Image (cartoon, coloured by chain):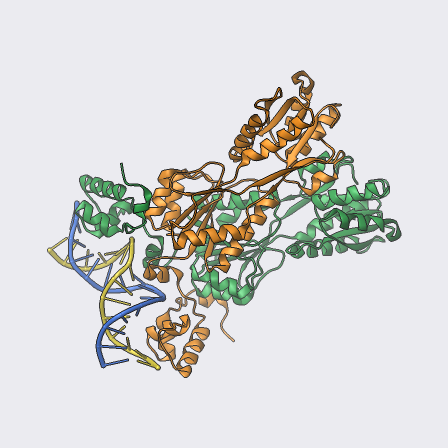
Chain colours: A green, B orange, C yellow, D blue
Amino acid sequence: MRKPTEQSAERPVPTSADVARLAGVSRATVSYVLNNTAAVRISEPTRRRVREAAEELGYVPHAAARSLRAGHSRMVLLPTAHVPIGPLYSQFLNELQWALRALDYTVVQYGSLGLEADEAARAWAELRPVAVVSLGQVQLTPQGVEILKRSGAKAVITLGSQRVEGAHALVMDQGRVGRVAVEHLVERGRRRIGVVVPEEPGLEMFAGPRLEGARQAVAGTDATVVPLPLRYEEESANELAGGWRERGLDAVFAYNDEYAMLLMRALQDAGISVPEETAVVGSDDLLLGRLLRPRLSTVRIDMVIGRHLAELVDSVVRDPQSAPEARDLLASRVVRRESS
Amino acid sequence: MRKPTEQSAERPVPTSADVARLAGVSRATVSYVLNNTAAVRISEPTRRRVREAAEELGYVPHAAARSLRAGHSRMVLLPTAHVPIGPLYSQFLNELQWALRALDYTVVQYGSLGLEADEAARAWAELRPVAVVSLGQVQLTPQGVEILKRSGAKAVITLGSQRVEGAHALVMDQGRVGRVAVEHLVERGRRRIGVVVPEEPGLEMFAGPRLEGARQAVAGTDATVVPLPLRYEEESANELAGGWRERGLDAVFAYNDEYAMLLMRALQDAGISVPEETAVVGSDDLLLGRLLRPRLSTVRIDMVIGRHLAELVDSVVRDPQSAPEARDLLASRVVRRESS
DNA sequence: TTGAAAGCGGTACCAT
DNA sequence: ATGGTACCGCTTTCAA
């Protein structure tokens, strides 16, 4: 039985030298044993003594020292910021982390909320990650990319709507979400189509392209698109629903299912029938949307596969020239239910 | 104009020695200037030359080397895993990160999905964080805590239902959520009270205590509690609703608002009126719950303030004895709407 | 005001 | 089969 933890506060952190001393060998040997270095043969008894010494001391290698010596790390840095993320996104994030760990990378999310683009890039660069995968929550500039690469990052990959010079871009064509939604509404005979644009910060990078896609969908038809600012609050939705008839709208693409549910309720409370008077389409295919009456039509988004992206990261790390500069990885299709 | 990025792949990462050479000074001087070391006076012209050289080379200090030399880091590690997190949680997380950064800590989330408890603790320990704040998504054992402390972590703080020996515990009394919900139902005259227990993995640590709290609420009354396993799928909810009358239940605490919405819809589809025949209470006070008819009653949970926790982390780091060992930081109260 | 040099904790080359 | 040792990038005495 050992003394309680208060004492351990004083006890210095054990190093490989401590392990070596206890095992009666050199630091080199400790390193060989604990890393199973293939190029060198260590006798079984020695191996055991080293392992036991390490165990006894509670030795854990110092990642910083290791990567300092090695001249590189296997850290993949994922910048994060406050974006109201849905199940799609968080599932993807977990897939990605899992897949990267399987490839022996250390995955670290770096909360970068409130940092300026280049300031953030410097902060990341200090950690000398071998790769940075920006999920598009934090804006990355060409200078930022340059800083990272100068600091040894082999791969800088952006996953978002817009491309950044110097970075590998996985274009998630958010515009397509808006386009298929509105194409669907046009096919259903709708002509005056509202498109909800959330006012919450952090959503612009999704909302803008979706609105743009909606506009593309009506180009060459006699339908028109009307942007509809909306806060995610009942009051805001009621206000919007209040002036609905004056705007003469007969359909709305509501950004996503949550905004759609909010707006649909407000419309119904204002006496506007769905889908007869106004059709409603959301996106993300949330389970909750299926519980409404009428059931909510939605755009189902198939996110990039995490494993796929992990492999891309790995291949770019191994050979920066290897991978294509840009790809589109966002399949979207409408799931019609009852609200459209 | 510089050459495109392909070349920079070859260019070695600039070090403080490179800056020193370019500025025509020693590495020591570079360090003094860039860190604004107060104990030493450097002439203004020299400072300028150093700064310009650093700028020109795109120099970014190497965090690992710095903390290796310093013997400590200011990294706070937050283990994360796949828990379907709501807006409450993610807001809290962002508050915490923001507050810690304001206190000059580097906050890093470490995705630990699928790692065993002690395996995870070792992985974290390799990074030599000065503090680990476990949000309860990854189980921490006393051995894990010991490993971390031996590796120099000044503060190991757990935020969860159960306490771990050696760690500072911020007890989030999930039991209380179940207790107030069921107390409310008892007060409203209900006697056979179902408690939804989600079958999704990762939720046990919330679901268990909530059920336990529900049991406490009926102790000493003539009401009873019935655990109801439920998957977050329509089919599962319909099954549960199908056998509802045979169970003779007149109320249900549905774990949270999402499960509540799912179940309430299934109950209504099965011809069971809410709240007349069965009362329903969720938790988290989601906006969407207010859109249903009847409006969903819920338990509003006031999470710990991020800034508060950040200050606790800081004070424990500065003096491990300073802070109280445990506190309860989860206020919960029922918001009655129409479903109960 | 500035520089030389030691040392943080590992790893890997070169001897032995 | 093992040990000695240089070195990774940076900070910080101590001397000049």
| B201 versus A79 height, above or below | above
Quarter assignment of residue B252 = top right
Q: Residue furthest bottom?
A: B45
Q: List x then y, in percent, for residue B295.
A: 74, 36
- Whole-percent x and y of residue A307? 51, 44
Quadrant placement of the C terminus of chain B: top right
Residue B242 visible in the shown view: yes
Compared to residue A258, the image places residue A212 above or below, namely: below
Task: Give x and y (percent) for residue A159.
Answer: 57, 54
Counting the numbered discs, the total is 0
The residue at 34%/44% (across/down) is B147
Seen as rendered, the residue at the extreme front is: B220
Q: Is residue A284 left or right of residue C13?
A: right
Tell me, yes or no, if residue A103 can be seen here.
no
In the displayed structure, does residue B208 sit left or right of residue A189? left
In terms of depth relative to the viewer, which is nearer, A255 or B227? B227
Task: Provide residue B310's location: percent of width, then percent of height.
Answer: 49, 53
Q: Picture quarter containing residue B21?
A: bottom left
Residue extending farthest top: B246
